[in-house]
Amino acid sequence: MPGWLKALLIVAIIVVLLIVGVVGAGVFWWMRNKDALMARAKEVVTEAKDFGSKTDNQGCVDESISRYKKEPGFSSAISNAIFMRTCLDASKPTPGFCNDVPKKTEFMKSAEWRRDQCSRIDLSKDSYCQQLFQPVQDFCEKGPSRTTVNSNSGD
């Protein structure tokens, strides 16, 4: 067997072992932390429903941004996206809230709108900021979820 083939096989075996190791570590981490993560998600949903019942759409966005600014980062962006969407579903309509919000399929307008939103709130350099505004686009495109009643949907 030529030397280059042996080297290639060794590299391939090492890559496979690394992938198996990373996947195994991920599964192990999930098994140890899933209960805490699920409890936190339920807590966020409860907080969002409560907050949303006392405010309007813009209040939900403002609160989500405020929460994110206190604790920025990947997991906070996910948590605040869940908070925002749940809050929007439970909140009162804000007149004109969705007027300038592009559909997610309008890729260029969507990217520009998200970038502008991040600049407006002084988070233009934050790599997760644009993800905070996806729930707004979802809400404006689809309306409130079917489990809530909100006059934003036009029903």
Image (cartoon, rainbow, N blue to C red):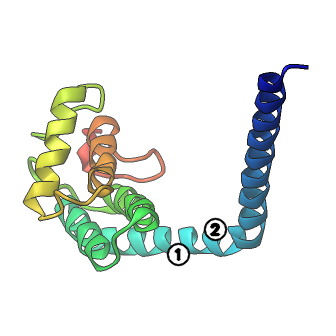
Q: Which mark is residue 38?
A: 2
Q: Residues within 10 Å of mark 1 (few under 14, many from 20)?
A: few
Spot the residue most to the bottom.
70
- Residue 82, above or below 72: above
The residue at the point 17 percent across, 61 percent down is: 58
Q: CA distance from mark 2 to mark 1?
A: 9 Å
Residue 145 percent coordinates (x, y) = 42, 46
The residue at the point 21 percent across, 35 percent down is: 110
The residue beneath circle 1 is 43
Q: Nearer the viewer, residue 19 or 29?
A: 19
Quarter of the image for the C terminus: give it. top left
- Side of 51 relative to 107 (left or right): right
- Residue 128, above or below 44: above
- Earlier in the chain: of badge 2 and badge 1, it is 2
- Side of 146 relative to 9 (left or right): left
Element type at mark 1:
helix
Residue 71 percent coordinates (x, y) = 35, 77
